Image: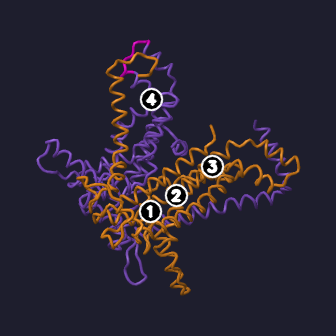
Chain colours: A orange, B purple
Amino acid sequence: MIPSLPRPAWLRAATTGYVILFIAFLFLPLIIVAVFAFNDAPYPAPPWRGFTLDWFLGNAARGRIGLFADSDLLASIGTSAIVAGGVTLLSVGLGTVNAFLLERGSFPGKQALSVLMLAPLVIPGVILGISILAFASRIADFADDRFGWDMDFLRPGLPLVILGQFSFIATIATLTVSARLRRFDRTLEEAALNLGASRAAVFATILLPYLRPALLGSAAIAFLMSFEDFNTTLMLVGADSPLTVMMYGRMREGATPVLNAVSLFLMLASAALALTLLRRRPPA
Amino acid sequence: MIDTRTRTDARAARHAGGGPWQARLTLSLLLAPALLWLGALIVLPHIELAILSLRKMVGPHRYEFTLGQYATFFKEPLYWHVFVRTAFMSVTATLLTLVLAFPIAWVIAKIARGRASSGLFMLCLIPFWVSETVRTLGWMILLRQSGVLPALLVKLGITAVPVELLYHDATILVGLIYGSLLFMLIPLISSLESLDNALIEAAYDLGAGGFAILRTIVIPHAAPGITAGCIVVFMLTLGNYLTPTLLGGKDSQWFTEQIYTQFITRFNWEQGAAFGFLLLGLSTLMVIAGLRLTGQRFGDVMRRT
């Protein structure tokens, strides 16, 4: 069971075998996706027909539309990046305010509020999506009927997608920043105040640098979660498709290996993000 | 401890020149964004959804209260069949995920040490940085009739012709389990790490076998982690849309798909809202049941994961 107790040889072998199988199971789909981005065939399927970069560099003249010539796919990456940028700014901003509210503020109903803040994580994403869609439509209809205002941003489209993703990613940012603020040694702040620093100076020179890792970490997580979200986005999307929705549509139809190419690009991007994040993390 | 804290607060307030109204102003400035977020994006939309699910149109801009949408759900076998099926498959996926993840959590928390342990954990973490869409694409290339695994089976002489491995219930389960493993691993590892090895050694010295140790010491200690993992995995599975529809194809019959059909395809928002509430109800019920079962608080569980 544990190393300090005798473990029979068969158990050791079985454990090692299981770990290897488990890791293989985890990586198999990813490796397959990456490998078939380079297969010289019109569909991502065996057999292997030789190495090609067509699915990255190909264009209409070569008969194969590669990633860098696929304007729809590139546009959807841009759309996802805009959405993710908006969600990240909103979430980290609100997460920071919430952290101060929960860690420093005292007011009646604080306990209830902090539990309510966790609710978005236990509501299925599809339901977050439809409820926000319905509520936004009611406001837009009301504004239209009553005042004749045309509130287009409340109709399915990118602003609603941003709000929908923000509704639950904000919780994650709140938890991350609060956890860091909770461990802050308040005597530092007190010392600075005693030495005559203003509140603003204390915030800018002591609290903000201290919170920086949590802010960067939650920004990276928010960006990634937004970029990869599908459930909530699907319900709120309008004419411009973010990448996940675009890929989903093409996967249903049976797509060319250009999807493998864009997937490989995504894997490398998230690996790069993960690495920078881990390197930044100070030793605990 | 409490004393110093109070004194610090008082001093900080004095430094800020804080009269009571200023403290109140600061508090309301901090409170406003949170209330706006929860009010406008969580509470009010769900009230709207509840209203939608309980009304029917009787004329232009005229609505009446009805339970008709919920009645439709129970009267139409297709709907509740899909609902029960989704719940059943989600429970199965959750239990299988627990069984598959537990040994790995044990290895990471108890057997491997130092670098090996953190390295193994990193290996488990990496696939989950990649989008669900990409991982599902991988499974499709592996499993479809013209895919890698059927071709391999033919080459090995196990099947004569390539078989279709997509669009089965088992395929949906594989996809769901694959996507859930990490959410099970994290709470399991943290609860197993806090288990004192001396307890296991003591039980062993007193003559307990492996199974007895597992049943009487390990599982009771890890119960909070097991519950947390199961709750999170069940919720994610129940609310999943991408994996069942892509790996299960037209016959996936997942309940989120029904919600999508009513809301987006048929534009029957009243029916879709009722379905949404039924799904939310089931999900909430399971969370509460899980917490009651092990006597834990919601906040603690969420913070652990």
The residue carrying pointer 4 sits among few (fewer than 14), some (14 to 19) or many (20 or more) residues within 10 Å by Cα, namely few
Q: In the rendered image, which residue does mark 4 sit on?
A: B220
Determine whether label 2 and label 4 are within 8 Å by CB. Answer: no
Residue at the spot 42% in from the left edge and 15% down from the top edge = B204
In-image side of A281 versus A107 (left or right): left
Q: Nearer the viewer, residue B185 or B15?
A: B185
Query: Would you place residue A245 above or below residue B163 in this image?
Result: below
Residue at the spot 52% in from the left edge and 71% down from the top edge = A159
SS state under label 2: helix
In-image side of B54 versus A192 (left or right): left
Residue A7: quadrant of the picture: top left
State which chain disc 4 sits on. Answer: B
State which chain disc 3 sits on. Answer: A
SS state under label 4: helix
Would residue A116 be seen by someone viewing this image from the given angle?
no
Disc 2 versus disc 4: distance between alpha carbons?
A: 32 Å
N-terminal of the pair, mark 1 or mark 3, is 3
Q: In the rendered image, which residue does mark 1 sit on?
A: A232
